[in-house]
Structures are given as C-alpha cells and as structure tokens.
Image: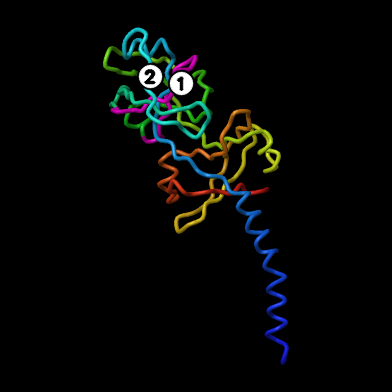
Amino acid sequence: MENYEELLGVLLEKLAPLQQTQEKSHENDEIPVGISNRHVHLAQGDVDKLFGRGYQLTKLKDLSQPGQYACKEQIMLAGPKGVIQKVRILGPVRNQSQVEILQSDSFKLGIKAPLRLSGDLAGSAGATLIGPNGSVELQEGVIVAKRHIHMLPEQARRFGVTDGEEVTINFAGPRGGSLHHVIIRAVENSGLECHIDTEEANALGVTPNTKIVIQKN
C-alpha cells in the first residue's frame, strides 16, 4: 500500500494518451448541424417575372455548401388559405424553381406539400410567388425538405455510409433525442453538414453550435 500513489500515477499516465485518442476519435465522428428556415430557389425566367427582365440576384452571404448563398431579395408566398411574407431566396439560379417550406406552413398556406429531397419535384405542390415586379404561378415545386446530411464520397466511406442511405442521428442536451430517416447525400463539392428545419431544431433544443453523431445500426 505504500506504493499506491506511485502506482496510481503510473496508471493514469498510461491511460491519458488512450483517453485523448478516444476523445479525438469521437470528435472526428461529430457532424455540424445547419438549421434551415423556409426558402426559395428560382429559375432565371421566374427571377425575371418577379424582379424584372435580366435581374441578377444580390449575394448577401455564403452558405455552408460550396457555391450556394443567401440573397438579399425576398418574396411573398401565397396559397389558397394564406400568405407568408419575406421568404428568403437562395442562389445561384436553378433550372427549375423550388420552394422549401415548414410542415406548419402547409396549413397556413392551404397546400399539401409532400416530404421530399431537394430536386424531387414531380407531382409536388403548387403556390404563387409574388415579387416587386410581378408574380409566378408554380404548378409544382413546393416541398417540405427531408432531413439529410451533406458529405463528400470519401467522408461517407469514413463514416461507413453510402449516398441515399437512411440513418439515425443522435442529439445530446436536455431536450436531446434521435431523428430517424435522415438521408445521406454523398456527392462531390459538398460541405459536411446535417440539415434539419427550424421546427425539428426547436423541438430538440438545437443551437448553431450543435453537432450530431450518426448511429451505427
């Protein structure tokens, strides 16, 4: 027993590097969370109708995904039962206009927006977009975005997942929990980030500094 403190010191000294390695490994497994509010992606033809022929959107700030940015411009979104003002436009322009709303927005607008991944617009809901220079009647293009994780293909290999795979993610904290059916989007030119909407974030107490871990099945 006389050497107890000495032996304990040696043991702790040997365990310290292992603990640091485990902590670093856990950090490497963490993925930052981005919180998405309702927003619009526009085709150039619809930009012209809403803001004037040849109008160019004004970059406000860059987003986490390479080449994407929030624009200074906002529009009004209208449905059979109501309107939502000041809906932010995201750039750059796309081939087809797309509106991503919250689930509760569907009730306010009076439309049935399906739960879809970005770009999966066939047969989705329609709505009216109103800008300072005119309006656009979308026959389809309004969705509630599925939660997803952007990553590069090499990052997907590190996490042990594949493009299009559904995974479960875990949130720590006093209101933490798990979200299922999170889609992996592993393509080139991606920034590592998990995207959930503001309703999901509020329910789980998520803040801009929150990180998640993919649950291995």
Give the distance between the C-alpha atoms of the residues marked 2 and 1, in whole angstroms.
Answer: 8 Å
Q: Among all residues in the image, which is located at the extreme top? A: 53
Comes first in the chain, label 2 or label 1: 2
Local SS, label 1: strand
Q: Position of residue 181 (x, y in %)?
A: 57, 39
Task: Please say whether residue 24 is one of the residues in the magenta stretch.
Answer: no
Residue 92 bears which disc, if any? 1
Q: Where is residue 197 in the image (x, y as percent from the top left)?
A: 44, 38
Residue found at x 63% / y 54%: 26
* Magenta part, dominant SS: strand
Residue identifier under label 2: 57
Question: In the image, is 157 to the left or to the right of 190?
Answer: right
Answer few, some or many: residues within 10 Å of disc 2's Cα (few below 14, many 20 plus, some between 14 and 19). some
Give the residues in magenta: 84-104
Residue found at x 27% / y 12%: 133
Indicate the amino acid at tag 1.
Answer: Pro
Question: Which quadrant would the N terminus be assigned to in this image?
Answer: bottom right
Q: Where is residue 66 in the image (x, y as percent from the top left)?
A: 53, 29
* Mark 2 vs 1: CB contact within 8 A: yes
Which of the pair 30/3 is nearer the observer? Answer: 3
Task: Please say whether residue 101 is one of the residues in the magenta stretch.
Answer: yes
Local SS, label 2: loop
Q: In which quarter of the image is residue 149?
A: top right
Residue found at x 38% / y 19%: 57
Q: Where is residue 121 in the image (x, y as percent from the top left)?
A: 50, 20
Image: 208 above or below 48: below
What's the coloring here? Answer: rainbow
